[in-house]
Amino acid sequence: MPPFRLIVSAAVAAIVPFAALAQEASPTPPGSAMSSPPAPSLPPSPNLVPYGSMTATLKASTEFTILSKALEATQMSDVLAKTPGLTFFAPTDSAFKALPPAELHALLDPKNVATLQQVLTYHLVNLDLPTSKFKGAKGPVQSVEKGNLMLDGSGAVPRVNDADIIQPDVKAANGTIQVVDKVLIPGDVNLPTANADTGSASPTGR
């Protein structure tokens, strides 16, 4: 596989104005009491602490061992160490392990490194994007993979696609890490699954 290169595109940084997409709050009828929705139940935060670059920060934590190995395998570690102004939606080890075991095994198989790279670049945005930029709003942003991520800051917990951001705005030296509780799969990826009998991988739609 050729070395991974981050392609800077004006389209990547062209975010829909989130303020224009903010949902208006419904007025409360006179005399009615406002009740707060119950707090969502989230996985525990990994308490990720900035430790230099994004790559160094992730490697310094015991909660991102699968992700760190995947970044090395796809030659993306240098990108997250040296390229400034990025946002990376970082799945924890628990997020990876929540995938069906056959899918996780096949995704991390060296034979499927191109697919793994496509999945990881879908977690990467060529823009420093703290949650304050989409608080109270929803909107798409283009990933480096070229697929859109849907950001949602309208609720109590910020989200990206169907994942919760369980630790927001970890400020590494070259960008922002948003810790997520799910692995984000782009719609144009055929995620491989392992054949239970032979152990070989075969693509399947996701």
Image: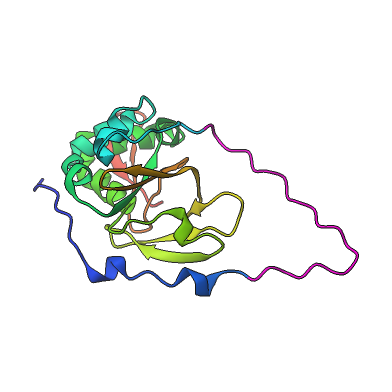
Which one is nearer the viewer's eye here, 184 or 82? 82
Tell me the residue at 32%/31% (across/down): 66
Quarter occupied by the N terminus: top left
Q: Residue furthest right?
A: 31
Q: Which residues are magenta?
A: 24-44
- Main SS, magenta region, reads loop
Tell me the residue at 14%/49% (across/down): 4
Q: Residue furthest top?
A: 62
Q: Is residue 33 magenta?
A: yes
Tell me the residue at 80%/67% (across/down): 28
Q: Residue furthest left?
A: 2
Q: Is residue 68 magenta?
A: no
Q: Measuring from the top left, give residue 52's x and y in whole percent.
A: 26, 37
Which one is nearer the viewer's eye here, 168 or 173? 173
Count of numbered circles in the view = 0
- Is 140 positioned to the left or the right of 75 in the image? right
Q: Is residue 186 above or below residue 140?
A: above
Q: Is residue 33 above or below residue 103?
A: below
Q: Measuring from the top left, give residue 107's x and y in whole percent.
A: 30, 38
- Is 74 positioned to the left or the right of 150 in the image? left
Q: Measuring from the top left, give residue 35's x and y in whole percent.
A: 80, 53
Which one is nearer the viewer's eye here, 156 or 109? 156
Give the quadrant of residue 183: top left
